[in-house]
Image: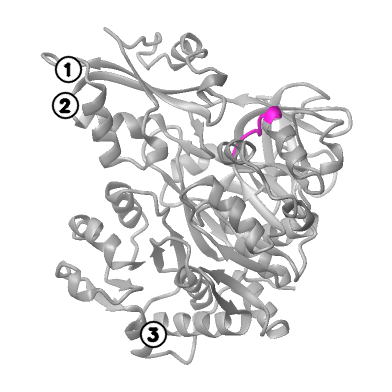
């Protein structure tokens, strides 16, 4: 059994060397070829002086080099940091600076957009470009060397790689918190291997499966399409889609057997005509990142009558927590299921005691899927990663669990039901969005005097971002100007769907924005027609 993340790939390659591992734009990379290139990348990193646990960022769409760099970094004993390809320069700069990235893997086109911020990243030493357009790139900032992908690998290979164990960190995935900029969730080899093997087991993944990867690898749910496939020797078809219709076409063309999505994507796919043959080979679909609307679920089941639907709940801080078996969907509408294999989910009162059946409490996840904490943020780590509730009897061993901040209830048979979030996070399009990160951008615009971002119910997005704003002195409300600022500084999923102009933003007795009041006032802003 594999103990380290890269061993999922390398062990499988030893058994299925000629089997297709990755498919991208008509080209195929076998497990044997992928393993060989992963080894080359790993040994090139060490030959260039990268130390154990140095951070390597990958800012690319889904392509062969993306996967090679990620798993090669793990093989070298370094830490990979997948950066969402939708992010703009300010967010990428924050990630590069926050975890002191040493090597950035990207493309010439993306480098042009990033060039102005690279000089602000004091630990960055190398930028590796996966294409050959070096002549079109600006000169590198002082202290940073630019290299082509093939040249980087050919320059030298170390005979050795750094030794790591399963509790060593291997990845940092950035996720928004309730305040401030995104936090880096630090994951160990053990976290990622346990998660991959657990999910692959209940999805019953097998070598003949063909999984379509449409979600970003910076999202733990998206990354798991790789790790669960590599666990069993399945093939992964890499795709960055423009329109939902493209996904339906690809499922049919590539005879896809497994597809993962988030609620807004499923809402769009449910409205499309699926070829009849899709249901013959699409063995399962999965949903996470929020609850799938009941109407969407029914439409998908009608369009894909032979396809199993797995409804899941997860945390970046614990990879995946629960799933509802397809056989239970009709019997338990609205349930997020039970704990996945090798995890335990507890429902806990504020005093740390366990709740009774159907009593609301906080979801607490314990086990080997619990992440190591937040990068360079002991305060936030202490808030979310705390000792597991004491269990009666037996040997009392200190154990850290992740306290989700989500309120749930557990019925008499152990099935869980989501009730709500305790913090101010906005859950839109499958992403967790910090309201303060949006507010920082609009305040810097000089167009507003005060503003609060909130999430309100939306039939497709789950929640839509609404900005309640007060114009700056001498300024008139200007949706176009403020939204243009947001589009320049924020990824598309963080741009407000609506701006509500007011004379003031309500605050609570503590002087903080009264987001609960605003959410209640605007809860009916979007209707089914907005879907």
Residue 460 found in image quarter: top right
- Left or right: residue 176 compared with residue 110: right
Instruction: Check residue 291 for magenta coloring.
Output: yes
The first of marks 3 and 2 along the sequence is: 3
In magenta stretch: residue 100: no
- Find residue 438 and name its label: none
**Residue 28 percent location from the top left of the image:** 57, 76
Q: What residue does disc 2 label?
A: 446
Q: Which mark is residue 472?
A: 1
Image: magenta residue range: 289-295
User: Percent from the top left, x then y, of residue 361?
Assistant: 70, 25
Residue depicted at 38% across the width and 16% down the height = 513
* Pointer 3 or 1: first along the chain: 3
Distance of label 3 from label 2 (alpha carbons) = 47 Å
Is disc 2 in contact with disc 1, using a CB cutoff of under 8 Å? yes
- From mark 2 to mark 1, how far is it between C-alphas? 7 Å
Quadrant showing the N terminus: bottom right
Q: CA distance from mark 3 to mark 1?
A: 53 Å
Question: What kind of element bears circle 1?
Answer: loop
Local crowd size for mark 1, using a 10 Å CA cut-off: few (<14), some (14–19), many (≥20): some
Q: Main secondary structure of the magenta part?
A: loop
At which x and y percent is residue 159?
47, 92
Please tell me whether residue 465 is drawn above or below residue 365 in the rendered image. Answer: above
The residue shown at (36%, 49%) is: 87
> In terms of depth relative to the viewer, which is nearer, 114 or 102?
114
Q: Secondary structure at mark 3?
A: helix
Q: Work out whether mark 2 precedes mark 1 in sequence or the reverse, and give the earlier one.
A: 2
């Amino acid at each position: 059994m594999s103990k380290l993340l890269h061993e999922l790939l390398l062990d499988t390659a030893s058994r299925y060397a000629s089997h297709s591992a990755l498919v991208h734009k008509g080209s195929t990379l076998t497990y044997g070829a992928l393993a060989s290139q992963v080894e080359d990348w790993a040994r090139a990193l060490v030959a260039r002086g990268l130390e154990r646990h140095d951070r390597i960022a990958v800012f690319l769409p889904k392509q062969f080099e993306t996967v090679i760099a990620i798993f090669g970094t793990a093989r070298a004993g370094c830490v990979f940091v997948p950066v969402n390809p939708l992010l703009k320069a300010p967010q990428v700069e924050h990630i590069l600076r926050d975890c002191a990235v040493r090597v950035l893997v990207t493309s010439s086109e993306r480098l042009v957009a990033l060039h102005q911020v690279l000089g602000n990243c004091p630990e960055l030493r190398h930028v590796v470009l996966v294409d050959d357009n070096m002549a079109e790139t600006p000169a590198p900032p002082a202290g940073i060397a630019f290299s082509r992908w093939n040249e980087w690998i050919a320059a030298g290979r170390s005979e050795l790689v750094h030794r790591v164990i399963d509790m060593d960190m291997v990845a940092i995935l950035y996720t928004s918190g309730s305040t401030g900029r995104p936090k880096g969730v630090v994951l160990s080899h053990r976290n990622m291997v346990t998660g991959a093997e657990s999910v692959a087991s209940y999805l019953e993944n097998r070598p003949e499966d063909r999984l379509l990867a449409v979600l970003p690898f910076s999202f733990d749910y998206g990354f798991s399409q790789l790790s669960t496939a590599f666990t069993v020797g399945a093939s992964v078809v890499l795709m960055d889609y423009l329109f939902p219709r493209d996904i339906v076409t690809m499922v049919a063309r590539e005879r896809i057997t497994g597809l993962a999505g988030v609620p807004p994507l499923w809402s769009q796919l449910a409205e499309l005509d699926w070829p009849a043959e899709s249901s013959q080979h699409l063995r399962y679909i999965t949903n996470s990142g929020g609850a799938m609307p009941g109407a969407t679920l029914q439409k998908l089941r009608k369009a894909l009558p032979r396809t199993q639907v797995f409804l899941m709940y997860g945390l970046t801080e614990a990879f995946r927590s629960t799933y509802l078996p397809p056989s239970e969907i009709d019997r338990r509408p609205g349930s997020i299921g039970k704990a996945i294999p090798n995890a335990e989910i507890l429902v806990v009162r504020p005093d740390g005691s366990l709740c009774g059946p159907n009593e609301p409490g906080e979801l607490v996840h314990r086990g080997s899927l619990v992440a190591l904490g937040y990068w360079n943020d002991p305060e936030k780590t202490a808030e979310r990663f705390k000792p597991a509730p004491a269990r009666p009897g037996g040997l009392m061993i200190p154990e850290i669990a992740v306290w989700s901040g989500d309120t749930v209830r557990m019925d008499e048979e152990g099935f869980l039901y989501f009730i709500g979030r305790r913090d101010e996070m906005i859950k839109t399009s499958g992403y967790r969005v910090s309201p303060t990160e949006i507010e920082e951008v609009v305040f810097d615009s000089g167009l507003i005097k005060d503003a609060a971002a909130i999430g309100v119910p939306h039939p497709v997005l789950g929640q839509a971002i609404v900005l309640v704003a007060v114009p700056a002195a001498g300024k008139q409300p200007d949706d176009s100007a403020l939204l243009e600022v947001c589009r320049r500084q924020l990824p598309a999923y963080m741009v407000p769907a609506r701006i509500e102009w007011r004379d003031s933003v309500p605050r609570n007795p503590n002087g903080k924005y009264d987001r609960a009041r605003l959410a209640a006032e605007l809860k009916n802003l979007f209707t089914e027609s907005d879907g």
